[in-house]
Amino acid sequence: MTEISIEALSPNREQPVPGEPENWPRFFSFSTDHKVIGIQYIVVAFVFFLIGGFLAMIIRGELITPEADLVDRTVYNALFTMHGTIMLFMWTFPVLNGLANYLVPLQIGARDMAFPRLNAVAFWMVPVFGVILMASFLVPGGPSQSGWWAYPPVSLQNPTGNLINGQFLWILAVALSGISSIMGAVNIVTTIIRMRAPGMTFFKMPVFCWAVMAAQTIQLFGLPALTAGAVMLLFDLSVGTSFFDPATGGDPVLYQHFFWFYSHPAVYVIILPVFGVFSELFPVYARKPLFGYKFVAVSSFVITGLSAIVWVHHMFASGTPGWMRMLFMASTMLISVPTGVKIFAWVATIWGGKIKLGTPMLFALGGLVNFLFAGITGIMLAAVPFDIHVNNTYFVVGHFHYVIYGAAVMGIYAAIYHWFPKMTGRMYYEGLGKLHFVLTFVGVNLNFLPMHPAGLMGMPRRVASYDPEFAYWNVLASLGGFLLGVSTLPFLLNMISSWILGEKAPANPWRAIGLEWLVSSPPPHENFAVIPTVVSEPYGYGKNEPLIASPMASTELTSELS
Amino acid sequence: MNIRLILKLAAIAGVMTAISLWVGQLAYTWMPVPASEEALLVDHLFSFLTTLGTFIFLGVAGTLLYSVLFQRAAKYDEGDGPPIEGNLTLEIVWTAIPLVLVIWIAGYSYRIYDEMNILGPMEHMHGGAAIAAPLTLAQSTDAPEAPEAPEAIEVHARQWVWEFYYPAADVTSTELHLPNHRRAKLTLTSEDVLHGFYVPAFRVKQDVIPGRSIDFEFTPIREGTYRLRDSQYSGTYFAAMQANVVVESSADYQQWLTDVAALSPQPGLNPSYDEYQVKVENRDNRPGWKTVEPAPYPLVNYSGASVLPER
């Protein structure tokens, strides 16, 4: 095997040239290199984040006054439907897949993912279903206007009577997204189980990999339910079956169970990798080991398990009997325990350390505080009598935006800044990064905190118009929203100019401990010249012990010089 | 762990407790005026959760803030911090305490839900009015002129208007009237899609499911006019699907029923239909997509106001 050259194995395979950010065409190709695919995911996802954010700006523009006076009601309903759908399926899931794709092989000491071509196929599906989803704006009748949940019977009402309508395209895009995600999940879970470097037992593996594995396990058991529900909905919509249509004997609440059986665990798919990011960053920027590493690692899987048995908390006011509401209240409350373990561990990691407030640390800290707040309102929502009052109001919208924007997006930004030097070989501009943080943190709190009193006072969600008593909170929220829109500008400026003109980055600009920091920035094509043997647990700050059996100094120097 | 440290921590905990209790009291003001028995229970629960949540938030965020302000690395210090990897006792404690806390919260919430006893779908109907009333119900003080077991008011939801039918008096209206201090019994039905029966002042909500008839109960305790809003997204004019709920004394309620029964049916409230006419005649020049047509004006004895009265 060692006598056959790489070229002879597959002579037509394009080799991306390592250490050459100027070779930008490879990012537009069907590359099987996990590092290229990771960046492709992140960039495409960010484009959709901007689109979804633009829709949010129009929504906040409508809601700054009580009357429905900016856009037609049908347009508003399409806006919030598409905003939610794009943000979930086109931004958070792909960007986190991108981060996982980039980091997991490097962090576990592998040369690539287990299935590189499946990896590329899963990525290239993203622009395809993205285009299908956006195309729904152009068909008669417009995009889906039934909310990102697509509850029947509303989602089955088809005013134009056409076969190819917005709802049809929506279901198609979501189903394709599910298939792409399942491919990604199979790949990542296999990679983590089978391709860890020698010496890297599970309890020597970085927490980011634990968290990603826990998240992708959820995708594997949850997505089939969503896909099944989507297919049945599509049949009801297009072919006249009666799974969910009450007029012909179907049960609309059955759809809700299929939908939420996946969509609740889906939120943990989003937050678990972010938890992983926090667990990676706090040790670096406090120069201390992660406190309670084993508890934190295992808690990821406890969350995975519990996430499967809480879905009815989205249906406390729906067609659910009292005993079911009580059962799921209990399971939902329980999930705060492993989550609390993580929060306390992070605080204990930071406490007594030597803290440096670089941009990644600021975003991680901001994310942690926002998540703490969101977790507390989450426990409130788990209490059925209280949820009956605030279900389907802006209190819920405020809660989940604190999680998604306040914690997850800020965590994603933290990760992008932290690993930007590794991915691009350039340093970003710290000043712009800090500006971005301030605008984001203020914007998140100004936009989403006022939603809580609005919901408590009884303002429903998904409304294009509202009673004047809610105007004050909505004006504040809209100002925050516009600030968030503006906050993306320093980030874009920073990323683009740094990638082109930034100072060259060393292999380990943060003096962090981890396999990814042992190779050059950016890493060579095959990641490691020699697969390292891991000898110690991660996060060995202050302990002066080597991470791997033999130093990779010579390889590192070679790639730095090439 | 010396005495001074323990005293300092105790003092901080004391201040945190005081602030948490104060915020817990504030929490009552963030809710609409409680207008039902259920609202009183829910507001107590919310205040309790807010107090607890404030304490936890202050504790964790306060610790972080202290750390970020006072434990920063010195300017040229590139060294590491102490290699503390964990503390088994602490980790067990911070797993066990939240576990106990959530069990406590869940138990308290269960008791509140049981007391509220709003029924809902698939609930076993207890025969007779007395059993359905919660134990802490304030006793009605006005003379019982209403029948002992008031029969259910029918609530018909359709895109996008609420219609109420009082079977005994044979009265239809687009404004819900209820007698004060009497257990309100409603039967919720939808003629098309999912809707949500939600009166924030009462803290009650139930999704209305087409193809099912759902029994729903609560007890108003305060005269006034409140808002009923559709809470489960139901299509184009969802936000406009609102109605007023008028709680009045039993005597006034009976009087209203009698007066209104004599009125001949006329088109009731339907803001969605009004708006739709504007769109159809393109009087607002705003482009939009094709929509499901709103139901026409329901024929009612009494239509009521489209907005809350000026306070």
Image (spheres, coloured by chain):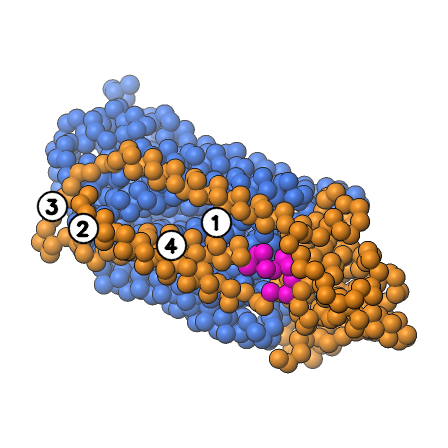
Chain colours: A blue, B orange
Labels 1 & 2 near each other (Cβ < 8 A): no
**Circle 3 sits on which residue?**
B79
Q: Which residues are magenta?
A: B34-43
Amino acid on which the number 1 mark rests in the picture: Ile
Return the residue nearer the eye: A190 or A358: A358
Chain of the residue that carries numbered disc 3 in the rendered image: B
**Circle 1 sits on which residue?**
A379
What residue is drawn where x is 83% and y is 73%?
A: B255
Amino acid on which the number 3 mark rests in the picture: Gly
Main SS category, magenta section: helix
User: Which numbered dot is residue A219?
Assistant: none
Question: Disc 4 or disc 2, which is closer to the eye?
Answer: 2
Labels 3 & 1 near each other (Cβ < 8 A): no
Please rate how many residues cluster around mark 1, counting C-alpha atoms within 10 Å: few if below 14, some from 14 to 19, many from 20: many
Q: Disc 3 or 2, which lies upstream in sequence? A: 2
Give the quadrant of the N terminus of chain A.
Answer: top left
**Circle 4 sits on which residue?**
B55
Between the residue at mark 1 and the residue at mark 2, the CA separation in whole angstroms equals 35 Å
Looking at this view, name the residue that lies furthest to the left.
Answer: B76
Residue A111, horizontal then vertical, whole percent: 30, 32
